Image (cartoon, helix red, strand yellow):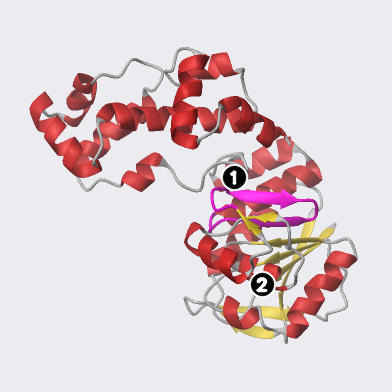
């Protein structure tokens, strides 16, 4: 049974802690014996108050237990925590002992403060990425990732990405089948690719009009089909003229450009997951041929699909 230590501190983000904790607890459901034993840790031990005010009873980091993995939560209290010498020394020592040391969201600041992330590719919540890079210039911050593994150092993006991180570690420890079953129990994606963007086209657009939302959702669900402006207007229950005016005011872009972005996003998810040839993926998302898809990728991402697949495989 693997021992997991969840490191928290005053004013930590509760979901950074509870999300991966629940994943590791759920994996053993219906098994004859638990695969993981989870421990909440803090520097001094005792009750630690999260940002919402919920308190968690913790053991001191100098508990004497041997941990296989340490998971550092993020939250508003990271600034004080990243200056705690005892905590930083503990993390360095655990890493030197061959342990897996990981962070969720802004917990990357604490891990970076140990020096262990120097010259390593890392990620964090998109809103904190620039600050992390400025504070620790030796760290290579990539804000466009759900999680990044660098040997025994793992970092993840904001909040719910901690669940992705946990599922990836469960898969590494126990295989894809058990990780998939855990994901189903949690009602989350079985595996968002580690290279997947933290953002989505629909999330970034976030139109206020329900009619435009309906049109965008229709487009996202029918990418393999030819999509005309008339199709989107029908989905929005508007005339062509009304739809064109409203769509432009809500998104600032033409429907054709948005559909291209949606197709690139959907194709990228498939490319990074390693499922299907580029020819098949191009057909599945409506590009119809790989060359058309390649041009769209270069225009929107700056690199061809082949480069993205090679990086994901590495």
- Where does the magenta region start and end? 142-160
Please name the residue shown 19% across and 36% down the image.
Answer: 247
Which is nearer the eye, 298 or 197? 298
Which quadrant does the C terminus fall into? top right
- Residue of label 1: 185
Using the rendered image of the protein, determine whether residue 26 is visible from the camera's viewpoint: no
Using the rendered image of the protein, determine whether residue 193 is visible from the camera's viewpoint: yes
Nearer mark to the viewer, of 2 and 1: 2
Q: Does residue 171 lie above or below 133 as drawn?
A: above
Which is nearer the eye, 131 or 161? 131
Q: Within the image, what quadrant is residue 42 found in?
A: bottom right
Total marks shown come to: 2
Which quadrant does the N terminus fall into? bottom right
145 drawn magenta: yes
Please name the residue shown 54% across and 72% down the image.
Answer: 75
x, y percent for residue 102: 71, 61
The reply, left or right, for residue 255 in relation to residue 129 is: left
- Residue of label 2: 110
Q: Within the image, what quadrant is residue 242 found in?
A: top left
């Amino acid at each position: 049974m693997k021992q997991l230590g969840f490191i928290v501190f005053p004013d930590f983000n509760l979901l950074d802690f509870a999300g991966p904790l629940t994943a590791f607890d759920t994996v053993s459901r219906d098994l004859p014996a638990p695969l993981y034993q989870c421990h909440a840790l803090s520097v001094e031990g005792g009750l630690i108050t999260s940002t919402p005010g919920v308190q968690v009873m913790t053991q001191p980091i100098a508990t004497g237990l041997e941990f296989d993995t340490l998971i550092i939560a993020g939250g508003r209290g990271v600034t004080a925590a990243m200056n705690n010498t005892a905590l930083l020394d503990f993390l360095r020592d655990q890493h030197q002992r061959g342990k897996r040391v990981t962070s969720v969201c802004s917990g990357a600041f604490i891990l970076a403060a140990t020096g262990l992330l120097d010259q390593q590719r890392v990620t964090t919540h998109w809103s904190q990425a620039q600050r992390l890079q400025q504070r620790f210039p030796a760290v290579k911050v990539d804000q466009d990732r759900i999680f990044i593994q660098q040997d025994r150092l793992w970092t993840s993006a904001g909040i719910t990405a901690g669940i992705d991180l946990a599922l990836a570690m469960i898969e590494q420890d126990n295989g894809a089948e058990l990780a998939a079953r855990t994901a189903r129990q949690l009602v989350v994606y079985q595996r968002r690719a580690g290279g997947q963007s933290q953002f989505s086209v629909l999330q970034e657009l976030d139109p206020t009009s329900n009619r435009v939302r309906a049109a965008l959702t229709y487009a996202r669900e029918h990418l393999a089909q030819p999509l005309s402006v008339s199709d989107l207007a029908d989905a929005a229950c508007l005339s062509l003229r009304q739809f064109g005016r409203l769509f432009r005011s809500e998104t600032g872009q033409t429907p054709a450009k948005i559909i291209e972005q949606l197709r690139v996003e959907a194709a990228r998810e498939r490319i990074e997951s390693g499922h299907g040839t580029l020819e098949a993926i191009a057909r599945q998302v409506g590009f119809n041929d790989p060359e058309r898809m390649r041009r769209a990728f270069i225009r929107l991402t700056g690199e061809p699909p082949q480069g993205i697949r090679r990086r994901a495989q590495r």
